[in-house]
């Protein structure tokens, strides 16, 4: 008997050894087959995975301590290229597969979903395509499926899900279509669920409310429709809901009963949500971020909004929210970002907002606010952005000199009814990048210490009543701006500046792209120093009293796209240097006293779309090259003394929309090829010496 038992044990050990050797052999062959389909820039695996060493010692391979079975294959961040071999399905003990951040292409082998011990499959950030194997959604043991940032397509798995242990499903940024199956509610252990950045459509199934352990739900940037399931807000474990960029509609509803919510992040912005902010919003007491911008939400901001005492970010812009700003907002001491622009909010700005000592961004643009801006707002030292433009605010700026805005980067108060002078405390905001006070009734001189704002990018002061320094002929504020070496935009037009442009204007930052001093009572010559502004794209001096000629130095502004000198008193010829402006799109020289020939070389400006030369003293013939400008949209040479005939090949101006030749000395027959100008909407040939009639042709738009 004992001998018989001994023989059985011996037979078992022999069979086990054979099986063990066979299993080890299978795992090694599977890994080598996988290696054969991939490459890397350094040939790292080819040099490391060799038969000279045990495969359990190969880089990225983890085996069981005793049995030499592969339980993990982790090769992230190695720039591996190629396809994923089906041979990996032969690693029957594989628990973790991590190939993230490589360049794998092709499909995910269907057989991987049948690995019985698989717990983690992480192949995110590759170039995989095809559909997701349905076998993955039928896996009893899988806990993490991370396939984000690939090119996977096809419909979501439509059959019943059975992934009882799944905790993380991340399919972010693929090309998935179809609907979220209701059987997703069977994955009751799910904690993180992300489908963001796909093309998934249909409703959010109410069964998502069954995911009682869910912490993070992200369905951003899809094509979801229907309403937001009320049951979502009953999941006490849920910390974040992100439904941004979809087509969800209906009201935002919370359960009427008492429920425990730990939700900290809620974003439903850029949908079609309607109705009011829920009256029981206070149930979400832990909220730190509430983002409902770009919807169709109506009603008032709840008067008791301060019940959200942990709120840090409040985004409600671009809705139809009305009523007044509740004073209780000032009680949310944690508030850092308040975006409320483009609504229907009325009434004054409550001074209580000045208590928000952690506030970084405050915007109420495009509303109907009235009254003064409370002085306390300008004393919140943490503020980085203040935007109240496009309202009906009035009154003066505070004159208190002790106001301190050390972190302010953006101040936009344009299109209001503000009065008084630009306060000096603004020039102490050393981090200011954008100062926009346009379209108000501000008076006094433009400060000459704007140079203190070393980080200033945009200075927008147009359409006020601002002046130059008293008893000064040159515009002194421009000298100070020379210290702002990051400037991109200066717009001080439509102010009674009454001064002369100094030649030192050329000392302005070489980064300057936009300079507008139109309709500002500017006298004198165009300074040659402008040629130093090498990045300038728009130069607008129209509507002033500039005299002299157009300096040839203009030709050095190689980036210039728009040159606007309309309605001045400029004389002389158009310098041929203008033809060097190869990026020019708009050239407005009308309403001056320019004379002589129109340069033939203007026809070489292939980017030119608008050319206005009317109301000058140009004579002789119109350059033939201009009749052939196929990209020109608008041309006016009216009210000059131009002679000659309109050439028969006028059809070369294929894009022309408006053409004004009236009040000149053109003669000859009106070319029949005008009929070939398919885009032409208005043509005026009147007051010339053409043969025939009907020289004005209004065409319907």
Image (cartoon, grey):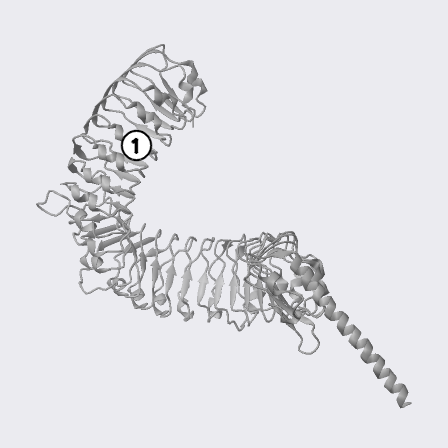
Quarter of the image for residue 471 reads top left
Q: Is residue 601 left or right of residue 22?
A: left
Q: Measuring from the top left, give residue 126's x and y in whole percent.
A: 57, 56
Q: Helix, strand or loop at disc 1?
A: helix
The residue carrying mark 1 is 580
Q: Is residue 60 left or right of residue 494?
A: right
Within 10 Å of disc 1 (Cα), the crowding (few <14, some 14-19, many 20+) is some
Q: Nearer the viewer, residue 555 or 418?
A: 555
Q: Measuring from the top left, give residue 143's x and y in whole percent.
A: 63, 69
Q: Measuring from the top left, give residue 457's x and y in whole percent.
A: 29, 51
Identified at 28% across, 66% down, the residue is 381
Identified at 19% across, 65% down, the residue is 402
Q: Nearer the viewer, residue 547 or 447?
A: 547
Q: Please tell me whether residue 663 is drawn above or below residue 284 in the rendered image.
A: above
Identified at 24% across, 62% down, the residue is 375
Q: Nearer the viewer, residue 318 or 218?
A: 218
| Residue extending farthest right | 1
Identified at 33% across, 34% down, the residue is 584
């Amino acid at each position: 008997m004992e001998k018989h038992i001994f023989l059985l044990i011996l037979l078992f050990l022999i069979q086990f050894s054979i099986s063990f050797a066979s299993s080890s052999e299978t795992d090694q062959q599977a890994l080598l087959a996988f290696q054969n389909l991939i490459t890397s820039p350094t040939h790292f695996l080819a040099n490391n995975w060799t038969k000279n060493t045990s495969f359990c010692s190969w880089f990225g391979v983890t085996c069981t301590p005793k049995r030499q079975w592969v339980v993990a294959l982790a090769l992230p961040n190695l720039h591996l290229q190629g396809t994923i071999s089906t041979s990996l399905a032969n690693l029957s003990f594989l628990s973790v597969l991590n190939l993230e951040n490589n360049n794998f292409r092709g499909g995910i082998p269907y057989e991987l979903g049948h690995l019985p011990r698989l717990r983690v499959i992480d192949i995110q950030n590759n170039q995989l395509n095809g559909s997701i194997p349905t076998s993955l959604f039928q896996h009893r043991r899988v806990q993490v499926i991370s396939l984000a940032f690939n090119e996977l397509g096809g419909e979501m798995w439509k059959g019943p899900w059975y992934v009882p242990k799944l905790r993380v499903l991340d399919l972010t940024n693929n090309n998935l279509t179809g609907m979220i199956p209701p059987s997703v509610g069977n994955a009751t252990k799910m904690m993180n669920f992300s489908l963001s950045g796909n093309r998934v459509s249909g409703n959010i199934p109410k069964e998502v409310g069954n995911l009682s352990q869910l912490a993070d739900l992200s369905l951003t940037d899809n094509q979801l429709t229907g309403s937001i399931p009320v049951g979502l807000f009953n999941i006490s474990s849920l910390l974040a809901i992100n439904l941004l960029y979809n087509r969800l509609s209906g009201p935002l509803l919370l359960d009427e009963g008492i429920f425990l919510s730990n939700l900290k992040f809620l974003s439903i912005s850029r949908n079609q949500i309607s109705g009011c902010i829920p009256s029981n919003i206070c149930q979400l007491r832990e909220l730190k971020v509430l983002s409902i911008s770009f919807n169709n939400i109506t009603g008032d901001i709840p008067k008791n909004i301060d019940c959200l005492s942990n709120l840090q970010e409040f985004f409600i812009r671009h809705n139809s929210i009305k009523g007044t700003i509740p004073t209780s907002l000032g009680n949310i001491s944690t508030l850092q970002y308040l975006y409320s622009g483009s609504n229907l909010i009325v009434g004054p700005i409550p001074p209580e907002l000045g208590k928000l000592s952690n506030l970084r961004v405050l915007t109420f643009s495009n509303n109907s606010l009235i009254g003064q801006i409370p002085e306390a707002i300008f004393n919140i030292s943490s503020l980085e952005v203040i935007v109240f433009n496009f309202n009906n605010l009035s009154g003066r700026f505070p004159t208190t000199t002790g106001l301190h805005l050390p972190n302010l980067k953006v101040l936009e108060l344009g299109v209001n009814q503000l009065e008084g002078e630009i306060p000096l405390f603004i020039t102490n905001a050393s981090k200011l990048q954008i100062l926009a006070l346009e379209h108000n009734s501000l008076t006094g001189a433009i400060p000459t210490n704007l140079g203190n704002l070393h980080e200033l990018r945009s200075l927008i002061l147009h359409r006020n009543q601002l002046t130059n320094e008293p008893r000064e002929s040159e515009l002194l504020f421009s000298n100070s701006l020379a210290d702002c070496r990051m400037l991109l935009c200066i717009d001080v037009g439509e102010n009674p500046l009454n001064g002369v442009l100094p030649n030192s204007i050329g000392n302005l930052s070489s980064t300057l792209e936009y300079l507008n001093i139109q309709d500002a009572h500017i006298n004198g010559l165009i300074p040659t120093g402008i040629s130093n502004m090498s990045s300038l794209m728009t130069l607008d001096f129209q509507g002033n009293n500039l005299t002299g000629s157009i300096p040839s130095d203009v030709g050095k502004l190689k980036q210039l796209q728009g040159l606007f000198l309309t309605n001045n008193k400029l004389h002389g010829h158009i310098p041929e240097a203008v033809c060097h402006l190869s990026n020019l799109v708009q050239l407005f020289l009308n309403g001056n006293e320019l004379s002589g020939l129109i340069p033939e070389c203007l026809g070489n400006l292939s980017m030119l779309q608008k050319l206005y030369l009317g109301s000058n003293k140009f004579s002789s013939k119109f350059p033939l090259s201009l009749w052939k400008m196929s990209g020109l949209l608008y041309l006016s040479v009216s009210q000059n003394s131009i002679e000659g005939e309109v050439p028969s090949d006028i059809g070369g101006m294929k894009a022309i929309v408006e053409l004004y030749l009236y009040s000149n000395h053109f003669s000859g027959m009106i070319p029949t090829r005008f009929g070939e100008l398919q885009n032409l909407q208005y043509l005026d040939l009147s007051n010339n010496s053409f043969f025939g009639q009907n020289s004005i042709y209004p065409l319907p738009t």
